[in-house]
C-alpha cells in the first residue's frame, strides 16, 4: 500500500526541521506557534535526546508551544529569568518581498511579537504558499483587542478604511479567546502599501493590545518548496 503525503505538510516539516538544525548548544530559543514550528519543537526535542544538542532553553510564544515543548522534552524558561534570546523561530501567514509578515492565524501574535522582536536572530519558517507580492493579498490583519473595547475599536478600524470581522471559534461557540483572555478582529485592508505605518496606527487605537503586522524584524526566511517531487528549503536573508 502506498501512502500519499500532503505536499504542504512535507514542506512545513522540511523547514521546521531545517530551522531546528540552526540551533546550537547553550542557546536560548524563542519557540514560535503553529503547525510549522511544531516540527521545529519536535526536532529540538529529538536533538536533545540524541545528545547532539545540550543545555538549550525555550521561551514559548503560546500555551500551544509550551505544551509541545513539555511533550518533546525541551526545557523552558521565562522572560523574567533571562536577559537575551539568541534565536526565535516562528511561522507566518504571509511574507512579502521585504520579509515583512502577517502573523496571528492562531491568535498568538501578541506573545510572538514580544519574543520574536527580542531575539538576536529571527528566523521565519513557511511553506511556499505563504510568499506574497504584497501583504494583505491572501490573509487579513489579526488585531487582539480587550473585550470591553470591541465596539469602539471596530468603528475606529472602519474609519481607517478597514473591513473588520470578529474572529469566531470553529468548534467552540462564540468568539476566539486568546491566551491573554482577549478577542481577535480580522481586518481586510484593500490598500496595505505602508505596513510599518499601519502597524503603529493600529496599536495607537485605545483597546488594541497588538496587531499581526511584523515589519522590518525578520533576519532569515526558510521557505519549504517542492522541487522534482521532493521538499527542499530555500533561504532568503534580509538585505542589509
Ligand atoms: O498565531 C499564530 C502564528 O502567527 C503562526 O505562526 C502562523 O499563523 C503560522 O502558522 P502555521 O505554521 O500553522 O501556518
Image: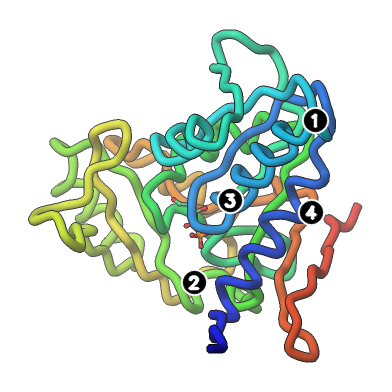
Q: Position of residue 232 (x, y in %)?
A: 79, 73
Foreground tag (2 vs 1): 1
Looking at the image, tell me whether mark 4 or mark 3 is earlier in sequence order: 3
Q: Position of residue 47 (x, y in %)?
A: 74, 39
Residue 182 falls in image quadrant? top left
Q: Which residue is mark 1?
A: 51
- Look at the numbered disc 3 and give the secondary structure of its residue: helix
> Marks 1 and 2: in contact by CB < 8 Å?
no
Looking at the image, tell me whether mark 2 or mark 1 is earlier in sequence order: 1
Please indicate whether residue 182 sits to the left or right of residue 12 in the image.
Answer: left
Extreme residue in the front direction: 1
Which residue is at the front of the view, 177 or 195?
Answer: 177
- The numbered dot on residue 122 is none
Give the answer, above or below, for where 45 lies relative to 172.
Answer: above
Looking at the image, tell me whether mark 3 or mark 1 is earlier in sequence order: 3
For ligand 1, tell me if the residue under mark 2 lies within 8 Å: no
Looking at the image, tell me whether mark 4 or mark 2 is earlier in sequence order: 2
Alpha carbon distance from label 2 to label 1: 42 Å
Foreground tag (4 vs 2): 4
Looking at the image, tell me whether mark 4 or mark 1 is earlier in sequence order: 1
Alpha carbon distance from label 4 to label 2: 21 Å
Q: Which residue is mark 4?
A: 220
Which residue is at the front of the view, 240 or 111?
Answer: 111
For ligand 1, tell me if the residue under mark 3 lies within 8 Å: yes
Q: Position of residue 158 (x, y in %)?
A: 26, 62
- Look at the numbered disc 4 and give the secondary structure of its residue: strand
For ligand 1, tell me if the residue under mark 1 lies within 8 Å: no
- Look at the numbered disc 2 and give the secondary structure of its residue: loop
Which residue corresponds to the image point at 60% horizontal and 53% vertical from the top-left?
39
Q: Which residue is mark 2?
A: 136
Foreground tag (4 vs 3): 3
Q: Which residue is mark 3?
A: 37
Amino acid at each position: 500500500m502506498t501512502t500519499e503525503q500532503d505536499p504542504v505538510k512535507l514542506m512545513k516539516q522540511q523547514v521546521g526541521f531545517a530551522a531546528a538544525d540552526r540551533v546550537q548548544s547553550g542557546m536560548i530559543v524563542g519557540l514560535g506557534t503553529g503547525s510549522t514550528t511544531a516540527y521545529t519543537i519536535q526536532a529540538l526535542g529529538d536533538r536533545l535526546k540524541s545528545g547532539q544538542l545540550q543545555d538549550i532553553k525555550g521561551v514559548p510564544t503560546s500555551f500551544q508551544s509550551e505544551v509541545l515543548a513539555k511533550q518533546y522534552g525541551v526545557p523552558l524558561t521565562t522572560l523574567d529569568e533571562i536577559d537575551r534570546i539568541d534565536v526565535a523561530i516562528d511561522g507566518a501567514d504571509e511574507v512579502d518581498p521585504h520579509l515583512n509578515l502577517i502573523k496571528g492565524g492562531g491568535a498568538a501574535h501578541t506573545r510572538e511579537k514580544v519574543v520574536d522582536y527580542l531575539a538576536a536572530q529571527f528566523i521565519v519558517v513557511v511553506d511556499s504558499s505563504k510568499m506574497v507580492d504584497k501583504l494583505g493579498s491572501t490573509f487579513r490583519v489579526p488585531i487582539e483587542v480587550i473585550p470591553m473595547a470591541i465596539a469602539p475599536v471596530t468603528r475606529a478600524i472602519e474609519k481607517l478604511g478597514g473591513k473588520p470581522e470578529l474572529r469566531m471559534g470553529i468548534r467552540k461557540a462564540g468568539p476566539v479567546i486568546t491566551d491573554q483572555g482577549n478577542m481577535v478582529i480580522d481586518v481586510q485592508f484593500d490598500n496595505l502599501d505602508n505596513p510599518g505605518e499601519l502597524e503603529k496606527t493600529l496599536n495607537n487605537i485605545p483597546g488594541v493590545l497588538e496587531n499581526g503586522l511584523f515589519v522590518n524584524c525578520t533576519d532569515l526566511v526558510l521557505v519549504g518548496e517542492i522541487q522534482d517531487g521532493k521538499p527542499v528549503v530555500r533561504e532568503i536573508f534580509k538585505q542589509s
